[in-house]
Image (cartoon, helix red, strand yellow):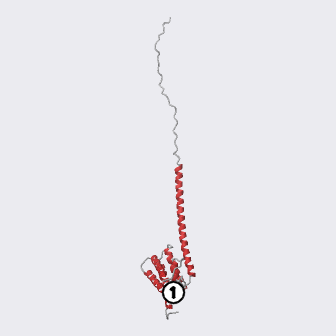
């Protein structure tokens, strides 16, 4: 006969400890640098604007230089054309060489003294011609409204056809230094002196011819 079965508290046998597992995390993906499109575009625009500004400045300088050169050339042509048309009289139409001669001779002599002074060639050429312009005003002939001081002086000094070349050379030397940006040298001063000596001889002969008993 089977006796009663023993009844007790249930036994619990722990198994191996299992830790909870986390779900797999996504792997990190390398991020690209932020797109710098606006900054690059702004830099390109600045470069383009700088280049355009530089081109505009260069174009402006070239235009101004061309205008200056053309103005100098036009002035020279006007002087030569006016010299070819102007008679050997003042603007008033009165030929007064005898009155003008003393002032002109003094001015030419002073210009020769300036060339002989110890000064830079550029300064000597400019000062000598400006002295001739003063001489032209002292000669008494009126200046035409359309004449520049240089044109006026050239007309007064160049009273005879034989003086045309010497006067034109002096005027060209002056304008090259004063307006053309060129520099004179010892050769330029020597050429100017030769022209002045020629003019001095011409005006001296004119004065002698106008004196009583002088040469015809």
Q: Dot 1 lies on which element?
A: helix
Q: Please say whether residue 210 is visible from this viewpoint.
A: yes
Q: 147 or 12: nearer the eye?
A: 147
Position in image of residue 175 (x %, y %): 51, 76
Residue that protrudes farthest toward the left in the picture? 118
Query: Quick check: 86 above or below 72?
Result: below
Q: Residues within 10 Å of mark 1 (few under 14, many from 20)?
A: many
Residue that protrudes farthest toward the bottom in the picture? 213
Q: 206 or 180: nearer the eye?
A: 206
Residue to which mark 1 is pinned: 97
Q: How many marks?
A: 1
Determine the residue positioned at 51% across, 86% down.
97
Q: Quadrant of residue 75?
A: bottom right
Determine the residue positioned at 51% across, 75% down.
176
Position in image of residue 40 (x %, y %): 53, 51
Q: 163 or 181: nearer the eye?
A: 163
Residue that protrudes farthest toward the top in the picture? 1
Q: Please say whether residue 201 is visible from this viewpoint.
A: no
Query: Quick check: 10 above or below 153?
Result: above
Position in image of residue 130 (x %, y %): 47, 78
Query: Quick check: 58 above or below 193?
Result: above
Position in image of residue 183 (x %, y %): 48, 74
Q: 193 or 23: nearer the eye?
A: 193
């Amino acid at each position: 006969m089977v006796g009663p079965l023993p009844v007790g508290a249930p036994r619990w046998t722990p198994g191996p400890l299992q830790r909870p597992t986390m779900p797999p995390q996504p792997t990190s993906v390398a991020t690209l640098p932020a797109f710098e499109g606006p900054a690059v575009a702004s830099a390109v625009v600045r470069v383009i604007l700088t280049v355009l500004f530089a081109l505009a400045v260069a174009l402006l300088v070239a235009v101004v230089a061309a205008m200056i050169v053309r103005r100098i050339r036009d002035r020279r042509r006007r002087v030569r054309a006016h010299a070819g048309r102007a008679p050997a009289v003042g603007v008033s139409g009165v030929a007064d060489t005898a009155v003008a001669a003393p002032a002109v001779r003094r001015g030419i002599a002073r210009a020769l003294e300036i060339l002989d002074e110890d000064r830079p060639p550029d300064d000597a050429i400019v000062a000598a011609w400006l002295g001739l312009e003063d001489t032209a005003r002292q000669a008494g002939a009126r200046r035409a409204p359309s004449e520049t001081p240089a044109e006026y002086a050239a007309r007064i000094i160049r009273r005879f056809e034989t003086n045309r070349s010497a006067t034109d050379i002096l005027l060209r030397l002056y304008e090259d230094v004063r307006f053309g940006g060129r520099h004179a040298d010892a050769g330029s001063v020597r050429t100017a002196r030769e022209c002045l000596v020629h003019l001095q001889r011409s005006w001296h002969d004119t004065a002698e011819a106008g004196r009583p008993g002088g040469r015809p």
